[in-house]
Amino acid sequence: MTKDEVLDILWRRAGDWVSGAELAEVLSLSRTAVWKAVERLRGEGYRIDSAAGQGYRLCPENDVLSEKGIRKYLKNKALRLEVYPSVSSTNTLLAARAAAGEPEGLVLVAGEQSQGRGRMGRSFYSPPGTGIYMSVLFRPQMDAAGAVNITACAAVAVAEAIEETAGVPAQIKWVNDVLVGGKKVCGILTEGAFACESGRMSHVIVGIGINTRIPEGDFPPELRGVAGAVLGEKGLPELRCRLTAAVLDRLTFYYKHLLEKDYYAAYRERSLVLGKPISILSPGKEPVPALALDIDRDFALLARLEDGRVVRLNSGEVSVRTFKCDPRDA
């Protein structure tokens, strides 16, 4: 498509002026066709400067989420990327593709979700322009108990990617939330399906939602004080593309070495809950106060109850909250 060809040249010459005449000559187009292509790109959210006698220039502040932008930074070239401005839910769409036999390695990325989902039936707020919402399809040879390893390595991948691309420290709240500055900036939803014959997973989908900036007008009232963003109200050039690529490269690396659990130490050292008082939340039961002691190598949480007993908590059965967090951040 013409606009993609224009964008490709502007990407490669990012920060430099490219004359309309040069674009027209290289692409065998009229100057009018070049102008129309630039206008379409602007309509998609790209910030492109124009000046008489100089031509066009891709602004360094651009933070448009696109396949081309992600691939510019992605090291794992084997991944198949599909990037959409808006979808209902990347996990829902990818589950349908997985059920139809899609091989592992497909990644759906969206700039907005109308029906974003979180753990335990919660919704995940997914406004346009300020976040990354992606799902990755895996087909591991494991039973359901092993799926928590994928969630854990995804949390480490996100935390490390945030630290690298944004330069801010990130923590992990057992088992699937990533926090910056004490506020949740990322939620991870791991879903899968069984093969009836073997009792093993036929596929696993890892859904990752990251708030990169605070939405215009702030988060909804019920999320304020709980939800945060990687960079608050600020932005960085191409942050969403760079962060997406960094997460995917780390996630797929850890997935290849899932059984070695090289990510365990990184997960544990970033834990938000260890050594802190928590509430254990089980469906249909009253919260139980406890002290978080440790996370074992199967990513179960060891906690001491008030009567002195030590219990081993499975993330698939319970969730926890620390007393420093808002009660809604369960």
Image (cartoon, rainbow, N blue to C red):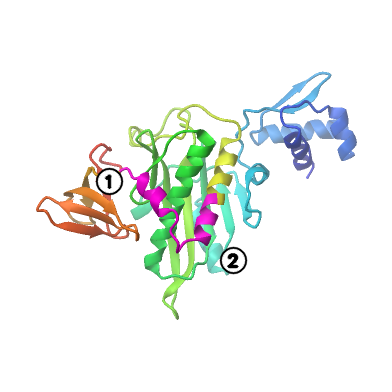
Residue 81 placement (x, y as % from top left): 62, 53
Q: Residue furthest left?
A: 307
Which of the two residues, 281 or 94, is positioned nearer the viewer here?
A: 281
Tell me: 56 left or right of 126. Answer: right
Does the image show residue 280?
Answer: yes
Mark 2 secondary-structure assignment: loop
Tell me: 321 left or right of 249. Answer: left
Q: CA distance from mark 2 to mark 1?
A: 39 Å
**Per the image, is 84 magenta?**
no
Q: Residue furthest bottom?
A: 197
Dividing the picture into quarters, in which one does residue 269 lie? top left
Disc 1 residue type? Leu
Which of the two residues, 181 or 61, is positioned nearer the viewer here?
A: 181
Q: Is residue 81 above or below residue 130?
A: below
Residue 187 placement (x, y as % from top left): 41, 47
Q: How many marks?
A: 2
Q: Which residue carries the number 1 mark?
A: 274
Span highlighted in magenta in the image: 250-272
Disc 2 residue type? Glu
**Per the image, is 263 magenta?**
yes
Residue at x-position 43% and y-position 42%: 125
Q: Which residue carries the number 2 mark?
A: 102
Looking at the figure, which quarter contains the N terminus? top right
Residue 38 placement (x, y as % from top left): 75, 32
